[in-house]
């Protein structure tokens, strides 16, 4: 008699831990959690995998970060922001740092970044940079940003950099 009582109590105790005392309420919570998670990771925080060494040492290759798509809903990108830039399709993006804003002229001379002829302090650039190339004679357009990676020890010809249109900037990288 005692063993029958223990057998009936065990499943009840296990069920209470796994499902709870109110299975319908637990099901509703699970559905709400799934819907909220899908909405957040589909429309707000988009995962991005880093492929390549261009953002070293700030971001390491093969790490996964998230892009906040709402970051620039009410404000524009700023100097130093790390952003995701959509290339083609839904999932092909670059991760770069904004170094120049619309209306600015950019130049790399002797490994130094110059914006409108003034040197810019870049504490995130840890490796020695020797880049020197012809400055842009025209300022960036009204919806153009100049983006480049943090690893400036690579030759600038091996680096993907340049002007990114505002509509291609998906959002700000977080974490």
Image (cartoon, rainbow, N blue to C red):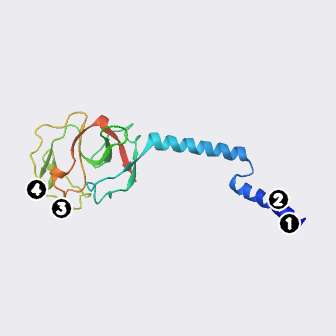
135 is higher (above) or lower (below) than 14: above
Q: How many marks?
A: 4
In percent of the image, x 37 and y 56: which residue is there? 63
Residue 42 versus residue 149 in the image, above or below: above
User: Mark 1 sits on what residue?
Assistant: 3
Indicate the position of residue 7 as horizontal and vertical percent values: 81, 62
Residue shown at 35%/38% (left/top)?
Answer: 75
Residue tagged 2: 8
**Front residue (pair 155, 172):** 155
Q: Dot 3, how many residues are within 10 Å of its Cα: few (below 14), some (14-19), or many (20+)? A: few
Secondary structure found at label 3: loop
Q: Which residue is mark 4?
A: 110
Marked residue nearer the N-terminal end (1 or 4): 1
Residue that sits furthest to the bottom in the current view:
2
Tell me how far mark 3 sits from mark 2, CA to CA: 71 Å
The mark lying in front, picked from 2 and 4, is 2
Dot 3 corresponds to which residue?
Answer: 128
């Amino acid at each position: 008699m005692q063993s029958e009582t223990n057998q009936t109590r065990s499943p009840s105790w296990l069920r209470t831990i796994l499902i709870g005392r109110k299975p319908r309420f637990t099901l509703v919570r699970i559905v709400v959690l799934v819907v909220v998670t899908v909405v957040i990771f589909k429309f707000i925080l988009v995962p991005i995998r880093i492929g390549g060494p261009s953002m070293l040492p700030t971001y390491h290759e093969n790490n996964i970060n998230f892009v906040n798509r709402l970051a620039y809903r009410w404000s524009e990108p700023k100097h130093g922001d790390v952003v995701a830039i959509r290339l083609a399709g839904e999932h092909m993006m670059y991760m770069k740092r904004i170094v120049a804003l619309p209306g600015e002229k950019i130049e790399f001379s002797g490994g130094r970044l110059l914006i409108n002829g003034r040197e810019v302090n870049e504490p995130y650039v840890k490796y020695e940079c020797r880049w020197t190339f012809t400055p842009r004679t025209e300022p960036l357009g009204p919806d153009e940003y100049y983006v480049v990676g943090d690893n400036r020890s690579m030759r600038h010809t091996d680096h993907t950099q340049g002007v990114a249109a505002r509509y291609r900037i998906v959002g700000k990288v977080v974490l």
